[in-house]
Image (tube, rainbow, N blue to C red):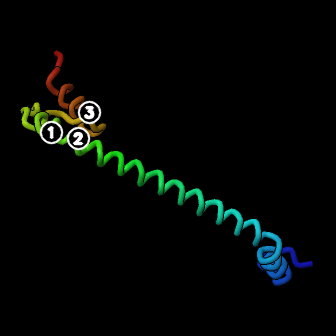
């Protein structure tokens, strides 16, 4: 008779299924995910170690590159935002008056 998702018999039945039938599946899944994450973290640590070893070799080369002057980036002028494009278009219309 009770078909609501909040009805007591349905809630009891769902909790029994959760604890009985699906508990083993969920535990197995959690175990698999934990093992996978452990392998992934080990792999990432190995990559970091390899990068540190290579970085030590390339430090001398980076010092030479840092000494070179970097090209300055212009920060003046119109931006690429839509608001700025709209403003620019409106200002150009004011300048081009036709009689």
> Which of the marked residues, 2 or 3, is nearer the chain's N terminus?
2
Location of the C terminus (image quadrant): top left
Task: Decide: few, some or many residues near mark 3? Use Cα within 10 Å; few <14, some 14-19, many ≥20.
Answer: few
> Which of the marked residues, 1 or 3, is nearer the chain's N terminus?
1
The answer to whether marks 1 and 3 mark residues whose Cβ atoms lie closer than 8 Å is no
Residue shown at the point (51%, 54%) measured from the top left? 40
* Foreground pick, 69 / 33: 33
Lateral position of residue 46 relative to residue 57, left or right:
right
Lateral position of residue 33 relative to residue 5, left or right:
left
Is residue 81 depicted above or below 26 in this figure?
A: above
* Foreground pick, 13 / 33: 33
Determine the residue located farthest toward the top in the rendered image: 99
Residue at which label 3 appears: 85
Task: Decide: few, some or many residues near mark 2? Use Cα within 10 Å; few <14, some 14-19, many ≥20.
Answer: few
Q: Which label sits on residue 57?
A: 2
* Foreground pick, 21 / 12: 21
- For label 1, the SS is helix
Mark 2 or 3, closer to the camera: 2
Lateral position of residue 55 relative to residue 1, left or right:
left
Residue shown at the point (22%, 31%) measured from the top left? 90
- For label 2, the SS is helix
The answer to whether marks 2 and 3 mark residues whose Cβ atoms lie closer than 8 Å is no
Q: Which label sits on residue 7?
A: none
Residue shown at the point (78%, 77%) measured from the top left? 19
Q: Position of residue 61 (x, y in %)?
A: 16, 35
Is residue 20 depicted above or below 95 in this figure?
A: below
């Amino acid at each position: 008779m009770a078909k609501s998702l909040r009805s007591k018999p349905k809630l009891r039945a769902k909790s029994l299924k959760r604890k009985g039938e699906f508990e083993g599946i969920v535990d197995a899944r959690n175990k698999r995910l934990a093992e996978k994450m452990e392998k992934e973290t080990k792999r990432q640590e190995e990559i970091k170690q390899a990068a540190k070893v290579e970085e030590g070799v390339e430090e001398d080369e980076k010092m030479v590159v840092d000494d070179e002057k970097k090209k300055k980036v212009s920060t003046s002028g119109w931006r690429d935002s839509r608001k700025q494009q709209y403003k620019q278009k409106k200002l150009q219309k004011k300048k081009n008056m036709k009689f």
